Image (cartoon, grey):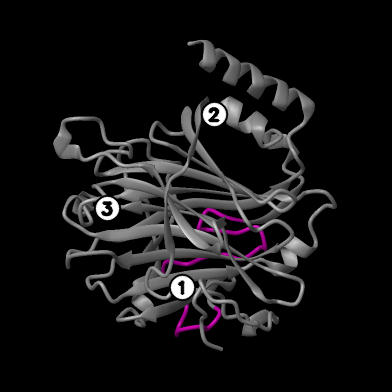
Amino acid sequence: MNKIGIASVAAVVISGAAFAGYSDRNENFIDGGNANVMGSFTGAQLAAMRSGVAQRNSSLYATNWTQDSNGASFTTGNIASAVSTLGQGGWAYYVASGSGTNPSNYKINAARPTGTNAPTPGQALQIGGAGSTTTSRYLYQDLTSQWAARTAGDDIAWVEYDQYMSSASSTSGNRTGGFLFGADSTGTIGGMMTGMTLEYGTVGTTTKQRSVFGYAYYTSGTTTGNYRFKLSDQALSSGGTSPLAVSGGWTKQVMSWNKTTGQVNWYYSVDGGANYTGFFVNGAGAGLDVAEWDFYASMATGTTAANAIFADFTTYATPAPGAAALVGLAGLMARRRRA
């Protein structure tokens, strides 16, 4: 089964090992401008907004790349043996275009890089950085059965992971991150429910080094499709502080999508999870269902590759925040308005 461009609408048969997933067909998204700024939050406040760590009612999938929540163990080396072939932990890879079909481009590393805000030591996922603007690489996990089995009312899907930026990021035009795709009850693609990418280098005149972007299935005017929204954009050459962890450091990324309302939230932290910056848009994915997560790496410009490296990954579902969390958030926003 072939991958399908996310900006199109096509029927997909979702059936276990035959599930082939989705791709963006070489950056087939629409630029949506700047996302709405939600504000800054401590790690504790973000935990309250997602109903608290102890209330993650429906765990969909989690892995530290040594073991996962399905009981699979990971060994160092290639994740899968060939394109669209289920490998370790049920992961499979796909190349939307260009090079990257070699299994060695998708592997488990024995150790995570050390550096600023490094997570707990352990194994890591690496997707080889693309060296050509015609290449887009994906590693995907089918989540349809886990979403279908979630606790009733747990309709906010969350994704969290840590991402490392190597020293090569200063000269690379790679774009890396991940997307949560959705579908309706017939298996028809609904698009990106949420997603985030980091821009390693300067791309053209509008995307600057170490920019952060959020993705969402969204409607603007009469056009509904997969949109990219700017979350931060600051050139290091300006003398300011980079919005991401410094070269050789880790950035925490958290995102959510609400099945009931369609709202998409994004948060990222450059201090190990102590503080987050949040953004949102009102997406068009209300009523759809989670289908798949894709880790992603592509070349936006240039020829210098920088590997995409990820640590702990988890996706889960929660109910809407409780009254206490909403009261706390309202107080926080009121203090910000008075400031």
Tag nearer the camera, 1 or 3: 3
Question: Mark 2 vs mark 1: which is more N-terminal?
Answer: 2
- Callout 1–callout 3 Cβ contact below 8 Å: no
Alpha carbon distance from label 2 to label 1 = 32 Å
Tag nearer the camera, 2 or 1: 2
Q: Amino acid at mark 1?
A: Ile
Image: 157 above or below 81: above
x and y percent of residue 108 in the render?
42, 64
Residue 65: mark: none
Give the residues drawn in magenta, as a range.
62-86
Give the image quarter of residue 203: bottom left
Question: Mark 1 vs mark 3: which is more N-terminal?
Answer: 1
Q: Is 105 in the magenta? A: no
Give the image quarter of residue 228: bottom left
Residue nearer the viewer, 179 or 25: 25
x and y percent of residue 230 in the render?
39, 46
Residue nearer the viewer, 71 or 33: 33
Q: Which residue carries the number 1 mark?
A: 79
Bin the neighbour count of mark 2 within 10 Å (Cα to Cα): few under 14, some 14-19, many 20 and up: some
- The residue at the far right in this view is 152
Tag nearer the camera, 2 or 3: 3
x and y percent of residue 93 in the render?
47, 76
Q: Amino acid at mark 3?
A: Tyr
Q: Is 68 in the magenta? A: yes
Bin the neighbour count of mark 1 within 10 Å (Cα to Cα): few under 14, some 14-19, many 20 and up: many
Q: Which residue carries the number 3 mark?
A: 200
Alpha carbon distance from label 1 to label 3 = 24 Å
Residue at the image position 66 percent from the left and 37 percent from the top:
50
Q: Which residue carries the number 2 mark?
A: 43
Callout 1: SS: loop
Would residue 97 appear left or right of 53 to someone viewing this image?
Answer: left
